[in-house]
Image: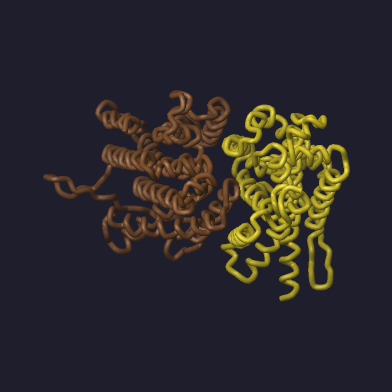
Amino acid sequence: MTQVILGQFLNGIIIGTLYGIIALGVTLTFGITGIVNFALGQFMMIGAYATWHLTDISHLPYPIAVALAVLIAGFAGLLSDRALFQFTRNNLVNGLLVSIGLISVIESGALLLYTATPKNLDFVLSGSWTFGDITVPRMKVATFGVLLVVIVFTWIALANTWLGRATRAYAQNPEAATLMGVNTEALQVGVTVYSCALAGLGGAMYASLYSLEPSMGALFILKGVEAAILAGIGNLAGALVGGIILGVTESIGSLFLPTAFRDAYGLIFLVAILLFRPSGLFGGQK
Amino acid sequence: MSSVWLLTPLYLIPVFSQSEVLLTILIFTFILSILAIGFNIVFGYAGQLTMFHGAAFGIGAYGTFLIHSSLGISFWLALLPTFVAILLLSLLVGWICFKFRLREFYFAVVTLAFSELVRLVILNWNSVTNGSLGLLVLDKPTFWLPGVGVMMIEGTRAWYLLALTSLLVVAALSYVLVRSWIGRNFAAIRLNEELAQTLGIDTFRYKLLAFAISNIMAGYAGALFGFYTNYIEPSQLSITQSLDAIAMVLLGGVGSILGPVVGAFVLTGLPHVINLSAELRAAAYGAILIVAILVMPRGIVGLLSRSRHVS
């Protein structure tokens, strides 16, 4: 039993980092542009399908495909910002609606291009590591590692560079930041694009582990938003921890309680946290 | 009642048009309008961004049919226990949310969470709801007409009349509600909740009231939807259902009675009017929504009439 629990725990951590990378995008976009981009799950889908296309059809090596997929997702983010999101800054409801419209458009695009048939990537890293009684597939460890590095990098970069200080200053007080010479517009575009690229990276890593369907994005944006709120909106490191907590709660919860209610455990946990700590586990806006 | 009367000429459409397609689109428009009007009461008037109406819609559909078929009572009688159930659930969810002073984004997320919980229960309660396969509704509501006796509401025309009449009743009730002191208290809460409280308005109670009313309207729309389409499935109470209604209200115009109807018509009708495949229809839906929001941030009704904000 112990190794089953431990195995589920590790699974939860890995799926949780995928939630975390979306949560990071949600937190960043919300802090800087005042909206939640609900289409982030679809940018993740773009990254996943781009990776699949580049490796299975164009026969590129996986790492190059991942890099290109991130660029493609980022570029799609830039397009959507110029065409849509630049008009919905600080308008939560309109941003929500525009991103719902974008979800329909991107998903039907994917359906037309790739049909609803699930796509599977060939094994990138086969085999697994064994620690005592527990076996972990190497690819899952690699996914965890890559996402962890990116999230920690983002966090450190925002904590230590001028750009990071500008971002945090803007999140705290937009007028004052603008007066101090922060280029607001560029910052908002940059954050939107960066969050889409992060989602694309999540999708590219996801593609190596699970099969792809055009509707895969919906689940992840929900979990991402849940994780971001769980941690406290605006808390970057918290986004990762929130994602992991969510992933582990679901994995462990479905061990002891009916699996069908897997998605419910995270939600109940979230509601409980929000009721007793309204600003999230680690507090909001840092 | 001016704005509600504007809907009455719609009764003449079946007289002039024989088109089944047009009438069917309008039936869907009317049923979804009821859902959207309900959402508009809690969002457009009382200012609370709920995501629970999708769940209420589904409970309405499942509850009415299950009570109707298991107890063998008519559609109309089965509505009552369904409404009571929705009322109790709304009071519970609303009580939790408002007691803990959840607002805006947080209120939306927690109501969304409860809505998902309801969907998961329905999806997994196989013995009663038949899980993801859904339920076939082989019955129709009946109606008693003097001289004719009891008749089934069957066929496009009869459903057109039922849907339109239901919409008129709901729209008229909403109109009376938002024009009353209750509606003024809703507006006060939307504009400034602290101030409303200082002025002696029991904001907790009024928010709960708006939430419950909107969910019961959503439940009625769901009951009609299930019996009209003959089919009930868990995806009818998915997040998409809630989001669609929000889109209709914002597209049509927040805080007006006709706005949701206009929005429902544009979003259900337009993708069908242009002859497209299913994938392209979803894309068209998205594109209409995006363009409408960017071009008319205050909705179609807001664009046509300069601020008909009933408050």
Q: Position of residue A116 (x, y in %)?
A: 59, 44
State how the image is colored.
by chain
Residue A281, placed above or below residue B47: below
- Name the quadrant containing residue B65: bottom left
Q: Quadrant of the N terminus of chain A?
A: bottom right
| Residue A118 visible in the current orientation | no
Which of these two is toward me, A274 or A251? A274
Which of these two is toward me, B311 or B2? B311
**Chain A shade:** yellow
Q: Which residue is drawn at the image coordinates 29% and 27% (left, top)?
A: B17
Which of these two is toward me, A147 or A170? A170
Q: Position of residue A27 (x, y in %)?
A: 71, 46
Left-right relation of B85 to B292: left
Residue B235, placed above or below residue A176: below
Q: Which residue is drawn at the image coordinates 71% and 51% (left, top)?
A: A284
- Name the quadrant containing residue B311: top left
Q: Position of residue A222 (x, y in %)?
A: 62, 50
